[in-house]
Amino acid sequence: MGIREDHRIHMLRDIQHAALDLVEEQGLEATTVGDIAARVGISERTVFRYYPTKEHALMPGQQGLVDALVASENAHHTSSGILDDLLAVCREHFSHEVEQRDFRRISRLLIQEPEMLRVVMRQERHLVEALSAALVHRGVLGPLQSLLVAEVVTVCWRVAWQSFARDEFDGVESDPVALFAQTVHELGQLFPST
């Protein structure tokens, strides 16, 4: 990595940490991009250079997930095979999120801050729209199948996050990656012939 890339990575982390600190201290509604910029010691314009909104600064992994899923190449050409391929990408990204981000802090905020759930819902809508459009564009699935696959991938992500957030809030030690695997397994149990 070069100096410029190191600086970018540090700036991304500094902005995210400031956003998390401020939301934990004063809530999502009361936190502004100006507050985040002041905490880091940069201008608001610089914050916007790295993140389009304060919500993206809080949860940068969501856009990374969208990018990873939309860019993924499918080894299979059936809807169930494509779903398996996408869930594998999702699982890998989920593991990366756990290692690289403030997973526990974000999970607690999701329980404590009702507005955070609305933010996540908007980001999930974007994920479903982008992924289903990409699948249709590739010509691998029709519009309805693409939408269903995108929704199922999104639901698995959400259920694993919610399960971890609930455990975290209740003080139960759990492994978020294992919860993701369990979510996918349970989905397979519900629909064994799909």
Image (tube, helix red, strand yellow):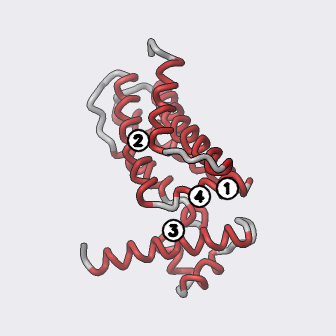
- Measured Cα–Cα span from mark 3 to mark 2: 24 Å
Sequence order check, earlier mark of 3 and 2: 3
Residue at the spot 53% in from the left edge and 33% down from the top edge = 151
Sequence order check, earlier mark of 1 and 3: 3
For discs 1 and 4, the disc positioned in front in the rendered view: 4
At label 2, counting other C-alpha atoms closer than 10 Å, the crowd grade (few under 14, some 14-19, many 20 or more) is many
Q: Mark 3 and mark 4 in contact? Answer it, CB < 8 Å.
A: no
The residue tagged 1 is 116
Sequence order check, earlier mark of 2 and 4: 2
Left/right placement of residue 113 relative to residue 77 reads right
Residue at the spot 39% in from the left edge and 36% down from the top edge = 86
For discs 2 and 1, the disc positioned in front in the rendered view: 2
On the question of residue 125 being in view, the answer is no
Sequence order check, earlier mark of 3 and 4: 3
* Residue 81 screen position, x and y as percent: 34, 25
- Measured Cα–Cα span from mark 2 to mark 1: 22 Å
Residue at the spot 66% in from the left edge and 58% down from the top edge = 109
In this rendering, the answer to whether 145 lies above or below 33 is above
Amino acid type shown at disc 4: Ile
On the question of residue 114 being in view, the answer is yes
In this rendering, the answer to whether 176 lies above or below 148 is below
The residue tagged 2 is 91
* Residue 36 screen position, x and y as percent: 60, 77
In this rendering, the answer to whether 17 lies above or below 99 is below
- Measured Cα–Cα span from mark 3 to mark 4: 17 Å
* Residue 74 screen position, x and y as percent: 30, 34
- Measured Cα–Cα span from mark 2 to mark 4: 18 Å
Numbered circle sitting on residue 106: 4
Q: Say which element carries label 2.
A: helix
Sequence order check, earlier mark of 2 and 1: 2
